[in-house]
Amino acid sequence: MTLLSKEFLEQLFKEHKENSLFGKWITLEHIVPLFQKHETAFQITSIGVSEEKRSIYALKIGSGKKKILLWSQMHGNESTGTRALFDLFNCFSNASKSELKTILEECTLLFVPMLNPDGAQKYTRVNANNVDLNRDAVAQVAIESKILRTTLDNFKPHFCFNLHDQRTIFNVEGTTNPATISFLAPSEEETRKLTLGRKETMSVIVAMNTMLQTIIPNFVGRYTDEYYPTATGDNFQKLGYNTILIESGHFTNDYNREKTREFTFYAIVQGLYHIATTQNFKSYQAYFNIPNNDKIFLDVIHKYPNSFDDEGYLYKDGILDNKLVSSLEKVPKKMLKGKIAHHEIVFETKKR
């Protein structure tokens, strides 16, 4: 396993961050103008249109035998992976580093940076017809699901990267650290059998986690591998396409997920480099050393002298007057048991 250094990755991100993309609400209008500067390096095509007739694009680069498919914003309100991909596009459009050249020589990369543009526009998890694309891999009711499956069948990747965001409620088990990045090698059936494909997927995750532990130690978790029979990752893994789930979560005081974007970028670059430089993917056992995700966080807790008066809150995002607005919603008292918060406010007097 060859790990990229913290210094290399930090410099790469600093030089190539796509500064025009900021914040959690990223729509098709934000990304389409950026394609122009990548037209020389990438093959850019429209692979279909969404339910509301917004274009879905794919960007292809590289000449290697190892094929890798990466997609983001399957859930329209989960944009951290999209921002990280455009940081990566800047790297590959100016691939002067030998490590980047190695990836492009050994791999052919196909990116779908916004699978659900209708959900992105409305800042919703689901598509325009209220379909969760990540639970539509079997029925393929949604146009967007059909487009992804057709892309998969035509490209026949050796590895897939399925990029998502996860809620602020998650922590790394056994710690009070948020699960800033979480990984999963999806199960292929209910027994969660360790198939060859899962082991190969775990091998890539081990490389990404090992690198991240040098940068954000104890902020990386393992997402539950409970089998979801209609989920995209589980079904793609079952079909023989090794699928790596990356969940971009919360980092301290990072509600815009700009630091998490950086760590997601690091993980993807390391994952691609590991695939490019590895001949076998047998070293997977350390995957099980990654702590599980747990759920001990609320966003805000108001603490009073009488703990029975304590109040807990979670942020809820929505679009208001064409702006993304986050508001605090109180949770039921029963949800406070055993919880801590990203922000705790202590009141010296009893609540009136």
Image (cartoon, rainbow, N blue to C red):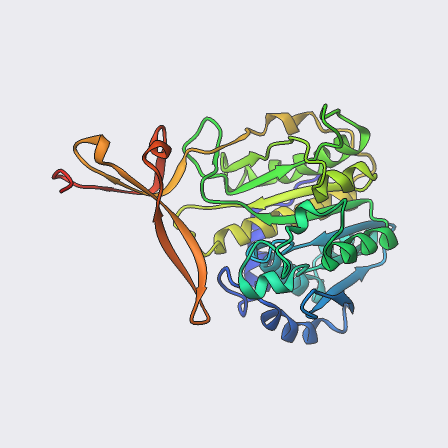
Give the residue drawn at x 82%, y 48%: 157
The location of residue 209, given as percent across then percent down, is: 61, 37
Give the residue drawn at x 43%, y 36%: 177
The location of residue 274, given as percent across then percent down, is: 73, 42
The location of residue 114, given as percent across then percent down, is: 66, 61
| Left or right of 22, for residue 142 | right
Give the residue drawn at x 76%, y 40%: 235
Quarter holding the C terminus is top left
Q: Is residue 184 above or below residue 338?
A: below
Seen from the viewer's position, the closer of residues 113 and 120 is 120
Q: Could you tell me how many numbered marks the image carries?
A: 0
| Left or right of 317, for residue 5 | right
Q: Is residue 293 above or below residue 216?
A: above
| Left or right of 139, for residue 295 | left
Residue 44 visible: no
| Left or right of 46, for residue 262 | left
Seen from the viewer's position, the closer of residues 114 and 282 is 114
